[in-house]
Amino acid sequence: MKEILLKTDSLSKSFSSGGALQHVLRNIDLTLYRGDFTVIMGASGAGKSTLLYALSGMDTPTLGTITFEDEDISDLSQDGLAVFRRRHCGFVFQQIYLIDGMSIMDNVLAAGMLVNKDKKALIRRAEELFEAVGISQETQQKFPTQISGGEAQRVGIVRALMNSPEILFADEPTGALNSKTGLNVLDTLTRFNEQGQSVVMVTHDMRSARRGNRILYLKDGVILGECDLGRYVHGDRKRHEELSAFLAEMGW
Amino acid sequence: MKSCRHFLRKWGGSMRRSLLIARANLCRSKGQTAVILVLLLAASAMLNLWLILDMDYKSNFDRCHDRLNAEHVTLLLNSEADGLKEYVRETIEKDETAAEYCIDEVLSMVGDFPYNDGEVNTDFVILEKQAALKRQIGRIEIVEEGTYTSGVYLPMIYGMGHGYSVGDRIHMTIGNNEVSYTVCGFLNSVMAGSHNCSMSALLLTEDLYQELEEKGYAPRSMLVSVRLRDRTESEDYEASLKNAVSLQYPDIRTLSNSYTLVSSSRYISQMICAGIVSAMAFLVMLIALVVISSNVIHYIQENMKNLGALKAIGYKSGQIIQALLVQFVGVTLLTALAGIGLSYALFPAVNDMMISQTGIPYKVRFLFLPFVITIATAGGVVALAVWLAARRIKKIEPITALRQGIQTHNFRRNHVPLADTRAPLSAALALKTTLSGIKQNVTVCITMLVLSLVVVFSGVMVENMIVDMEPFVRLIVGETADS
Ligand SMILES: Nc1ncnc2c1ncn2[C@@H]1O[C@H](COP(=O)(O)OP(=O)(O)OP(=O)(O)O)[C@@H](O)[C@H]1O
Ligand SMILES: [Mg+2]
């Protein structure tokens, strides 16, 4: 029996643009479990990012509730959400969004210092993570504009993991990378997941989606279907076929 | 104790976070920071200067007045008529208003001497040096002296700048007669220390005093000096005393002044100067605030993504605003310190010019209250400006900010759409950038305009006030006390 980490109850999100109301998420009931590598797929504009932002407390839902470990986060204030994010969520963006004026190390420390006062411990944690994702000492002293896209995305992952979040959210983390560096980032995420880190990842790409053990398909703001692939094993052909079949069924 | 330590740790942590962000900001805008630094430096230097002038320079008169036990009302009676002295004595003693008084024999006459390309024309009150130094009331002090044993001591105002020096010969007219003396030194007299007091004290060494008395160029007179219980009554008392004398002795020429008159007329130029310095300080401070506010607003617009990223990783709006505050207030406090240093470096020069107007010595010393007020004002005002400009950070939602800030970026209109324009590409692009930065450009224009106004204004002021105060004072207050 899996432990429930996050649960939504008829989660809806609408945007008003030009007077017209656009319902992007419609009554989503979703449960996320601890230790899972959940993948969310769907066509462009289906509402994947919007869902991820709502789940991670970046944005507030229009209707419905989100419960994280028994705490209702759907009507927290801006500041309340900020505190929620720093404690429980790590977020990896497609465009990474490191802070320009800070060195790589400072970028990571800026996140850590929100929760932990012990600077030495923070630096130790950062160095561990940097080593795990393969960012050298030298690179740590550079600035965001001086590193490659693949390096930047791995720094993004380190920053997201600094405070040991319960869930790591990743919105198309390999979208801006070429296939080799993308693979590297995926391996990193897979490795952390194998060590027990819960991951929720949005992707367009089957090769990335294969890494997850649970695939959700989002269409027009509704979860159309889901598929349980089991733990990722490298080079598993059957897994690939299973996923292809599921996506075909969903109309991918 | 424990909670105190907890607070300090918490504070230290938030400080460190703020500094991390602040450092990143400072590195990004060196040019703007430099402009802000210069403005704040000038503003705090002028603010401190003004506070010194306003809070201490004026009270220097009272300190001097107390030190020399100076009188509140001076009455010079140009006569030795029978019974006059007794009559004055009776009149003063009859009244409770006077606390103490003294009556001295002096010589007095209208006269003039050359000074600074023109001439000083005033009533001379001529005292014998030793007697003057021993006066109980209205003591006169020597502020500079040579080794000459025979000659005249002038009010120190005539020794400032291009005035006389010890050892010079001074040719003066006393009544209708010419005399010539060696300048032995300079004196400080509170109530008769310059032509602004309506009478100028001169000290003669004993030999010359006797010689002048014998020649009869300046008739014997009585100098009545009265200290009052309440100095605010000085003008009324002056009038009533003068009135009493002229009732009984209508033919006697009298000359008088009062604490109220002298204290204001000897400081009129300082008060005007302080007013101008304060006006300029506030003006420059205002410009600094406009620049800081626009800098902060600009920063927010330019760094929308960074702000979004900070929020996304869990920074509260307050923490980001705090970082901006730490950055600006920190820089401001350091600059204000430097500005205060600058004001003390400039003060001796200003002081010399002031003394040449007031004729009263003033020692430059460090003043704590103006220091605190300058630091607090600069810091507080900058903090307020930053806070007002940075408040909008609260409205930024992380996702909107990361998506280029749809809400606050409504000024980002698409000027000169390339699809419709017929202008050549380079012209269209130039127009685009100019128009999209229009707010910035306008701020820069206004700033430059006000700054150049301040520079021109202060240039004219210095020319008028310090170099030649007299026409300016007349312009503003009309003829003052130099009858
Ligand atoms: N802040 C907003 N204001 C108005 N409409 C929005 C806003 N954010 C998202 N939308 C709309 O919501 C819909 C879903 O957007 P979302 O970014 O969630 O899609 P997505 O599934 O992530 O697509 P993609 O795969 O292209 O990233 C889109 O039609 C978009 O126009
Ligand atoms: Mg998306």
Image: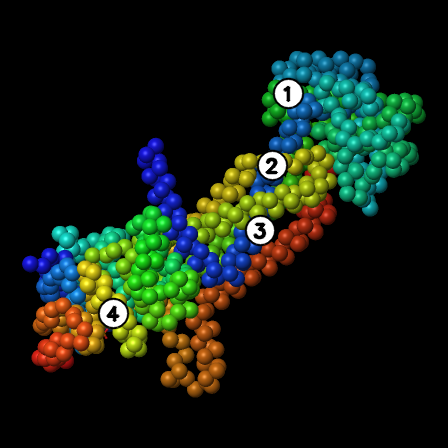
Find disc 3 in the rendering and name its residue.
B42
Q: Secondary structure at mark 3?
A: helix
Instruction: Please state the horizontal and vertical placement of residue A163, each as a whole percent of the image.
Output: 27, 55
Q: CA distance from mark 1 to mark 3?
A: 43 Å
Residue B393 to residue B156: above or below:
below
Label 3 or label 4, whichever lies nearer to me, is 4
Instruction: Say which chain tag 4 marks.
Output: A
Cβ at disc 4 under 8 Å from ligand 2: no
Verify CB contact (< 8 Å) between mark 3 and mark 4. Answer: no
Residue located 67% across and 34% down the image: B363
Amino acid, disc 1? Leu
Find disc 1 in the rendering and name its residue.
B228
Residue A72 to residue B89: above or below:
below
Q: CA distance from mark 2 to mark 4?
A: 67 Å
Q: CA distance from mark 4 to mark 1?
A: 95 Å
Question: Which quadrant of the frame does ligand 2 lie within?
Answer: bottom left
Q: Secondary structure at mark 1?
A: strand
For mark 3, does the 10 Å Cα neighbourhood hold few (<14), some (14 to 19), or many (20 or more) residues? many
Residue located 62% across and 24% down the image: B231
Verify CB contact (< 8 Å) between mark 3 and mark 2. Answer: no
| Residue A9 visible here | yes
Q: Secondary structure at mark 4?
A: helix
